[in-house]
Image: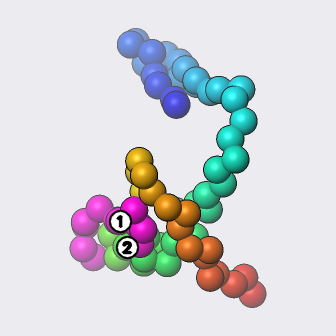
Amino acid sequence: MVWRTADSTALRIYSTPTPTGLRLPTLMHDPQYRVAVAWQNTACNRPPHPGFHLGDGMSTPPAPNIYLR
């Protein structure tokens, strides 16, 4: 978590040393979210939503199908 101080002169970064077995791809690897970000930046200003449930009780999202050239 990152928070600014009350006087906005610094950022405070909080982390945990506890390891986790959960690994998620970034939201930009989700095709639906990626397209939503693109349309938000060009015409329709609506918040982008991922193509899967992101929150408590979520299952593992599908592997991204993105190729680099």
Can you give x and y, in whole percent of width and height, for residue 29 in the image?
A: 57, 70
Q: Residues within 10 Å of mark 2 (few under 14, many from 20)?
A: some
Distance in Å between CA atoms under marks 2 and 1:
7 Å
Left or right of 20, for residue 59:
left
Where are the magenta residues, as a range?
43-53
Reading the image, the residue beneath label 1 is 49
State whether the magenta stretch is mostly helix, strand or loop. loop
From this viewpoint, is residue 41 visible? Answer: no
- Is label 1 in a helix, a strand or a loop? loop
- Contact? badges 2 and 1 (CB < 8 Å): yes
Q: Which residue extends farthest bottom? A: 69
- Is label 2 in a helix, a strand or a loop? helix
Nearer to us in this view, 34 or 5: 34
Check disc 2 and give the amino acid type: Ala
From this viewpoint, is residue 13 visible? Answer: yes
Above/below status of 5 relative to 43? above
Can you give x and y, in whole percent of width and height, for residue 46 in the image?
A: 25, 66
Left or right of 58, for residue 17:
right
Which quadrant of the structure image shows residue 66? bottom right
Check disc 1 and give the amino acid type: His
Above/below status of 64 relative to 45? below
Residue at x 66% of width, y 54% of height: 23
Reading the image, the residue beneath label 2 is 36
